[in-house]
Image: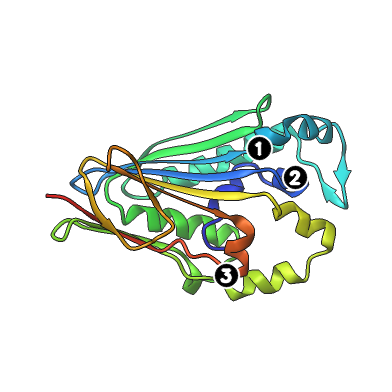
């Protein structure tokens, strides 16, 4: 499903709680290079999750062990290290707060698309439905294109009511930071930081699945 890449940071664990936050934090420099960090924050449900981790399964879903989760994060990190233009790939996992991250540096904004391709392949999502990133230095424009995936809504509608509850309070937040002032942006739901050098956009995961909200944004920067 578009825009839900960071859910892989805690594979399967997000199936057991509706209180989770998915966050992408991208910093773009003037030359188009930058850094990114993807976070899965389940700290609001840490007490419940700590209890669930002691079980073998819940609602017919296998509960992954800490070793399983660490191994999966290590596999994703190893995959990202193989992508040209991507470097300094790292991951963290905190089982006290239930927060996991994957961070990396990229030589060009376009490298984010390569990363998306790898992760969407693992999620079995059709290539034509991916989000995409672009940066044009000549027009000083950073773009995040988002295309709603109808299959995501169809798949959601087929879920049991208990499984649908998982997405009830989940949120997806995108933060884009720059070394220059933001002159304009196309998404009216996005918020501009006081410094005018960062843009934040937050949506309910359920709204993205249902196609009620869109994350597309074209951000123009000052000279």
Q: Residue at x 83, y 50 (%)?
A: 61
Q: Residue at x 74, y 71 (%)?
A: 157
Along the line of sight, the residue nearer the viewer: 38 or 57 = 38
Distance in Å between CA atoms under marks 3 and 1 = 24 Å
Q: Position of residue 24 (x, y in %)?
A: 46, 46
Location of the N terminus by quadrant is bottom right
Q: Which numbered disc covers residue 211?
A: 3
Say what secondary structure mark 3 lies in: loop
Provide the residue designation for mark 1: 42
Q: Residue at x 44, y 57 (%)?
A: 189
Q: Are marks 2 and 3 in contact (CB under 8 Å)?
A: no
Q: Vertically, is 210 above or below 104?
A: below
Q: Is residue 32 left or right of residue 16?
A: left
Q: Which numbered disc covers residue 17?
A: 2
Q: Are marks 1 and 2 in contact (CB under 8 Å)?
A: yes
Mark 2 Cα-neighbour bin, 10 Å: few <14, some 14–19, many ≥20? many
Distance in Å between CA atoms under marks 2 and 3 = 22 Å
Say what secondary structure mark 1 lies in: loop
Say what secondary structure mark 2 lies in: loop
- Whichever of callouts 2 and 3 sits on the residue coming sooner in the sequence is 2
Q: Position of residue 30 (x, y in %)?
A: 19, 45
- Whichever of callouts 1 and 2 sits on the residue coming sooner in the sequence is 2
């Amino acid at each position: 499903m578009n825009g839900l890449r960071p859910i892989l940071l805690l594979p399967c664990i997000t199936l057991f709680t509706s209180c989770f936050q998915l966050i992408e934090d991208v910093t773009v420099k003037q030359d188009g290079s930058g850094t990114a960090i993807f976070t899965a924050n389940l700290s609001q449900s840490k007490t419940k999750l700590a209890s669930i981790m002691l079980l073998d399964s819940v609602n017919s879903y296998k509960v992954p062990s800490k070793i399983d989760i660490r191994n999966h994060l290590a596999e994703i990190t190893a995959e990202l290290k193989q992508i040209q233009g991507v470097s300094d790939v790292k991951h963290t996992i905190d089982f006290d707060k239930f927060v996991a991250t994957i961070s990396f540096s990229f030589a060009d904004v376009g490298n984010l698309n390569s990363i998306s391709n790898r992760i969407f392949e693992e999620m079995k999502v059709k290539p034509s439905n991916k989000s995409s990133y672009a940066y044009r230095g000549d027009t000083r424009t950073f773009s995040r294109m988002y295309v709603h995936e109808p299959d995501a809504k169809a798949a959601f509608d087929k879920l049991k009511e208990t499984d649908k509850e998982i997405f009830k309070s989940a949120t997806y937040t995108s933060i884009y930071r720059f070394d220059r002032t933001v002159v304009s942006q196309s998404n009216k739901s996005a918020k501009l930081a006081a410094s005018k050098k960062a843009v934040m956009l937050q949506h309910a995961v359920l709204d993205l699945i249902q196609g009620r909200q869109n994350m597309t944004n074209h951000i123009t920067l000052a000279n």
